[in-house]
């Protein structure tokens, strides 16, 4: 197969899923050492990592703060798809809900939340997950394209594959001079992959 993944395997460069895990600090110790060693001597893979860093500013810090998912800029997701990563996508209208899962060989899980963004200056979100009752993850100053009419929500794969069945609720909020205005609420009923 002439996919980027297969090409990476034959050229000895780092596959994009390995690089993404490394960047998110989800790699095990042996893999991290192997990637570090490769990056020391490979400009091509160093450049690929730089692209992730440039496009994904803010994503890693959100994940580090303990959330399993966050809003990401569209070019970041386009970049992952162009690299040959296997994306599973769900589309959710405002006020809508979706039954979602993640397959063992999925690399990236993304939901596309439809939302009216005209006139929005700044976007915040609140994330609530049924596995953490009473906890509200506040996400501030999220990336969005006001013409797109959608916001992309990326899940941290290493954690998603370990999570039990749960329900997540994300509320998108426009930040305005006199307070925050709710733009839409989105519900994700997550079920673990059967037998996975
Ligand atoms: Zn390389």
Image: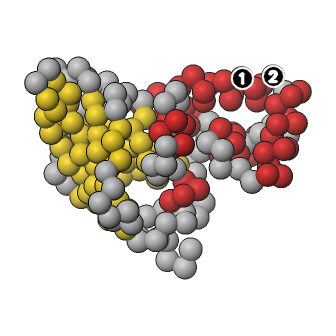
Mark linked to residue 47: 1
Q: Quarter of the image containing the C terminus?
A: bottom right
> Residue 3: x, y in percent?
67, 43
Q: Would residue 96 appear left or right of 100 to someone viewing this image?
A: left
Q: Most extreme residue toward the front, as rendered?
A: 134
Secondary structure state at the residue bearing disc 1:
helix
> Residue 68: x, y in percent?
46, 51
Foreground pick, 27 / 17? 27
Q: What residue is drawn where x is 54% and y is 63%?
A: 161
Q: What residue is drawn where x is 55% and y is 79%?
A: 195
Q: Most extreme residue toward the left, as rendered?
A: 178
Q: Would residue 12 appear left or right of 186 to someone viewing this image?
A: right
| Ligand 1 under 8 Å from disc 2 Cβ | yes
Q: CA distance from mark 2 to mark 1?
A: 6 Å
User: Is residue 176 at least partly visible in the picture?
Assistant: yes
Q: Which residue is mark 2?
A: 43
Q: What residue is drawn where x is 42% and y is 31%?
A: 74
Foreground pick, 104 / 26? 26
User: Is residue 87 at least partly visible in the picture?
Assistant: no
> Residue 100: x, y in percent?
38, 62
Count of all numbered marks drawn on residues in the image: 2
Q: Is residue 65 above or below residue 88?
A: above
Q: Is residue 189 above or below residue 119?
A: below
| Ligand 1 under 8 Å from disc 1 Cβ | no
Foreground pick, 3 / 20? 20
Is the Cβ of the residue at disc 2 closer than 8 Å to that at disc 1?
yes
Secondary structure state at the residue bearing disc 2:
helix
């Amino acid at each position: 197969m002439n996919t980027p993944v297969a090409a990476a395997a034959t050229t000895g460069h780092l596959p994009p899923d390995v690089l993404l895990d490394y960047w998110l600090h989800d790699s095990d110790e042996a893999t991290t050492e192997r990637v570090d060693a490769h990056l020391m001597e490979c400009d091509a893979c160093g450049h690929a990592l730089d692209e992730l860093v440039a496009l994904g500013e803010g994503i890693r810090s959100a994940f580090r703060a303990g959330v399993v998912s966050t809003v990401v800029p569209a070019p970041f997701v386009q970049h992952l798809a162009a690299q040959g990563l296997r994306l599973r996508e769900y589309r959710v209208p405002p006020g809508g809900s979706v039954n979602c899962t993640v397959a063992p060989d999925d690399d990236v899980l993304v939901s596309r939340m439809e939302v009216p963004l005209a006139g929005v200056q700044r976007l915040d979100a609140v994330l609530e997950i049924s596995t953490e009752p009473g906890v509200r993850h506040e996400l501030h100053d999220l990336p969005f394209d006001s013409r797109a009419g959608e916001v992309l929500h990326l899940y941290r794969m290493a954690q998603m594959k370990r999570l039990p069945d749960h329900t997540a609720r994300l509320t998108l909020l426009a930040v305005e001079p006199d307070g925050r205005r709710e733009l839409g609420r989105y519900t994700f009923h997550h079920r673990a992959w059967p037998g996975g």
